[in-house]
Amino acid sequence: MTATHNPSGDSSESLDDTPNDEPSSSTSDGGRRRRYSLLTDTDRRVLTTMVGIPTFLHVTLIWVPAVITILLSFTNWNGFRFDNMKWVGTRNYRQLFTVFEKDLYEALLNNFWVLLFLFLIATPLGILIAYILDKNLQGTAIYQSVFYFPVVLSLAVVGFIWKSVIYSPRQGVLNVLLDRTAEGDQISWLGNSDQIIPIGEYGLTQNFLAIIAPMIWRHVGYIMVLYLAGLKSVDPSLKEAAAIDGSSEWQAFKNIVFPSLKPVNVVILVITVIEALRVFDIIDVLNNPISTDVLSILVTESILGESSNVGRGSAYGVMLLLLCFGFVIWYLRSTFRENDTA
Amino acid sequence: MTHSYPTPSAWNDDVQRRSVLKGAAAGGLVVAGGGILSACGGGGDFSGEIGNASGTLNIGSNASDDAPKAGLKAVVDAFPNSDVDVVINTLDHNTYQENITTILQAQDDDVLAWFAGFRNKFFADQGLVGDISDVWDNIDGLGEGFKAASTASDGNQYFVPTSFYTWAVNYNKNVFSENGWSEPTNKDELLSLAEDMMSAGITPFAFANDGKWPIMGTFDALNLRINGYDYHVDLMGGNESWTDDRTRAVFSTWADLLPFHQEGANGRTWQEAAIDMEEGRVGMYLLGTFAASALTDASVMDFFNFPELDSSIGAAALDAPIDGFQMVASPTNEGAAKEMLLHMSTPAAQDAYLGADPSVVASNSGANTSVYNDLQKKSSELASAATGISQFLDRDTIPDFASAAGDMFAEFIENPGDVDTLLSDLEEKKVAIFADFNETN
């Protein structure tokens, strides 16, 4: 365990299992160099370009539209000719919670189910597969390709595959295997909105679970690859040491491997939350069956087409924005708190 | 005047894309093109006949599939005024529809493919499409139903219908003759036919709702049979209530008929349902005549008009979505645009179209029906006998509301017992959506 085998200063800090001596010297190294060096004009130009262009793009493509969306959510507008735009105050929001409340609550809950299932099922499964494949099994490359394959496909394509191959009422794999293809006996995988987990009027419907399944299928491969890359960087001598000390496989993973992969864990958490909040394509491709609304579907449904309702669509968009903010604030707070204690 | 300057809406047409590139190479000429076009456009005002206009005419089209694309080209080739250079700018079908407001506001095209009824009226009331009443003064052979479907709130016409198809009850001729069944003409016959089918182990009605639009056709048919055309139009226009007893009657009849329908409709595509009908697992399928396009052998298909349910209402109204063309509000070449629209209404143009695309029916009664196949003939007879032609729910009302209604129907067929809550929720949404709509339009 020396600092020399890992020259990139920041990643060694967290991947390295001896955070006390080497990394501190490497950071003070970097600090010293920065203090005594002057930026040349070229450096300054490069810096300005490299920071300026992304900042400009970020502000114009992310923040300006976000602010415009917030402003539009207080209007009633059909999407063409600005003189048609009427300020209506908070009416769109009031209607969201009184007239369109069932759509809104259904969508919020569905976004939550996606998050929950990706987080509780797909992510642990991906980690487990990565852990097993890391043991250099025979044919590991084949397994890796098999599990990673769905990630190469866009969710839209995944949706088409599952709809026509797996869920089709007459020819679909599932109904054929279950021998339920006869007329009147078919299981409607995408059309049945019976609740599996009821929460009052709302809940997790059977067909939404059928939509989450392909998302899990794809997410597992994604997590597997990320985690596999992380696992390769764990020093094998640590695991050996743990084994010699008599720890079980699970104890070694829980107490040594998992904590040492903290940066990867954070990336996985962030990716999972983003996937859950932005889910749109697969539901759209499956033609948004009954009771499968999510926020992004409500936004597009209100805004696309002739005679669109930009105000209400923007109000739905603001709901999505608030969810994102909630997560971002929680994430930043926990990150900063750690930095303070470190 | 033979130059054809490219327009921004030309990007989907290969030939046009090349000329766009050429135009871009010519730099500012593209910008100048607008001015030149308008200078050479308007070569003669519309005089009620074809032959006075000149210059370039741009037609925006959503006919991206092979057959309709060839059809439109045949129509343009048959245009008798050779002084007009016609450019067809084709966009992908869905892209065109999603961007229609942008296309209309850009006003690059003079004539645009579109749908009759509410969706044309909406643009007319917005002032985005042009009044073509003077074209209608010279149109022969289009019935009152077509004129009504082309008329906006101000009483003027803004649309030229060229073709349509009908919604009816499709069935497999062979299955019907093997079982000795015949087409029902009233409610009792329909119900006894359905019972017969049940006892023969065949589900009477195919039912599919993937996309949440196909079963709108069932609602339309029931409402037209139970409450009649005028009530249907008022309901679509937001002027009648969804909690009204007359509307409830539609849903209670629908609930009575649901046991005769395929289960799990929300997870089935209309293509799958049409194949179930072809292969004899179900007896009938209420769908547009485009159902034939999903069949392995379309010649086995026949259809009948949805039977009468109430003798005081009759069975003379139906869904027959009409396609056609409209003119933008301030076209570059108004004279040529109106001559083209007049041409499109003629039997000659429609014969040319149907020669390339035989899946639809000509709107002009003078069109050559001798080339029609049996289904086209029947569609044509149905529509000419109709006292009221509606356009299908998602073309007859505000799109926003159509999707709310589509959601409600999907819920209803799964939980018919919740109909009261579902209808009052839908009525609440209707009020909000129509208020939003009327405030900005």
Image (tube, coloured by chain):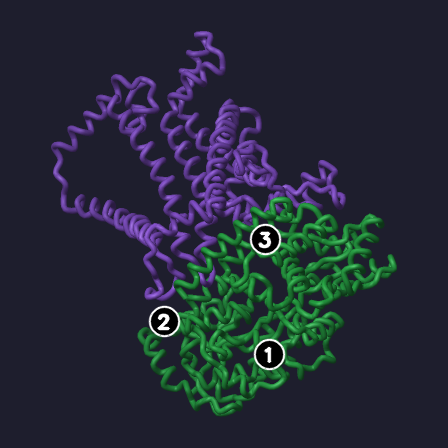
Chain colours: A purple, B green
- Say whether residue B395 is visible: no
- Amino acid carrying label 2: it is Ala
Q: Badge 1, how many Cα within 10 Å: few under 14, some, many 20+?
A: some
Instruction: Please report, as a chain letter, where disc 2 is located.
Output: B
Percent from the top left, x then y, of residue B264?
67, 46
Q: Quadrant of residue A256?
A: top left
**Mark with earlier residue (2, 3):** 2
**Mark with earlier residue (3, 1):** 1
* Camera-side residue of B224 and A274: B224
Q: Badge 3, how many Cα within 10 Å: few under 14, some, many 20+?
A: many
Alpha-carbon span between mark 3 and mark 1? 35 Å
- Circle nearer the viewer, 1 or 2: 1
The residue carrying mark 2 is B24
* Camera-side residue of A127 and B335: B335
The residue carrying mark 1 is B74
Position of the N terminus of chain B, as image quadrant, is bottom left
Residue at the front extreme of this rendering: B245
The residue carrying mark 3 is B212
- Circle nearer the viewer, 3 or 1: 3
